[in-house]
Amino acid sequence: MISEAASAHFGKPFSGAELPAAIASVKNTTAEEFLRQMNKMPLFMTELDETGEDDDGENIALEAIKALQEEGEPWEIALNFKDTGNERFKWKNYTDAREFYTKALAVKCDRNDINIACLNNRAQCNLEMKNYRKCITDCREALKLDSRNDKPWFRAAKALLALDKIDEAAECIENAKLLNPTHMQILALAEKISKRKEHLERQNMLRKERERKKKWEADALVIALKARNISTRSTSQPPEMPDGIAIKFIEQGKPESGLAFPVLLIYHLHLQTDMIAAMPETAMVGEQLVEVLAEPQSWDQKGEYTVAGVDCYMETKTGGLVKVGKKVSLLEVLSGGKVEVVDGLVKVLLVPRAKNAEFVEKWKKTMRK
């Protein structure tokens, strides 16, 4: 009845209060589209959008504000750009903020306070964007205009710390402290730089100590090898060895503990190998074979490689062969004067006893070639 009465009074069907035209136009607009349209209005912009309402042509409102920014005396133009940059900075839109500070500086006005503020603010933008070297450059330019401003010293120190240029960072933060000795952020950064410097100094001391020990051990190994009459030789293309695989003392840093050698067991006729990472010099070859050949090799289909069924050989300095007894220690073999350790690796050839003659004959033919 109410609806009918209203219709009779107004002369048209009554459907409730009508929306204002501006609101009605966006009633059926998605949230994403609404925010995009709002961003075209300078008052609500969070990033620059220079297109018109239909994403075509110029944004008239923005162009009008730009025109206002570029009217007036040089210092007024620069100030307008700086203020716009500050607004962008508040929104954490550092890219646009930096652009406006750059435009302000490009005006080259004669107001040092504006130029210094723009350099400091642009330095902060670069710091936030992790453009540390550009930040340092801006701080340097700001200090040329006013060396008693603590902000560029502080920001340069932060950028230098990020680059691990600790001595320079410490110098910058000390200058900032002299200018503003009670500023909490400056004091906190100074403490952070100091701790980083102490950490790096400790790391450097440990590195030098490791290098000293490494050199001492290398020299001690040379002496130990010579004392045992063990010949060594290096080639121009040594094999790539896994980390930690090398001639070394059985107990690190203790020459009296004896030497251990990496030993490569070569199944010559089958082109297969096994590695013993650290064989003590006092160990006998046969003892090691008991462990290595405890289980049949997957490729040894005939079961030829057993402790009792193989003979061991090493290549001599002249390229020949010497038979290695299984009850002889590694030290006795290496110090006998006939063999040498090449590229820090002892190589032992394992041959099935039934094929000894064949193997030796082939080796001799290779030597004659």
Image (cartoon, rainbow, N blue to C red):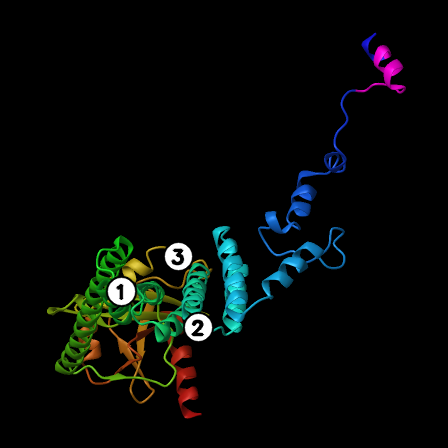
The residue range painted magenta reads: 4-15
Answer above or below: position of 320 versus 296. below
Q: Dot 1 lies on which element? A: helix
Q: Which mark is residue 176?
A: 1
- Residue 363 percent across, percent down from the top left: 40, 83
Q: Are marks 1 and 3 in contact (CB under 8 Å)?
A: no
On the image, numbered disc 3 is attached to which residue? 296
Residue at (53% x, 72% y) in the render = 107
Give the CA separation, mark 1 to mark 3.
74 Å
Q: Earlier in the sequence, mark 1 or mark 3?
A: 1
Q: Dot 2 lies on which element? A: helix
Give the tally of numbered discs.
3
Given the image, on which type of amino acid does mark 3 rest? Pro
Given the image, on which type of amino acid does mark 1 rest? Ala
The reply, left or right, for residue 51 in relation to residue 149 is: right
Question: Residue 186 colored magenta?
Answer: no
- Residue 294 percent across, percent down from the top left: 32, 56
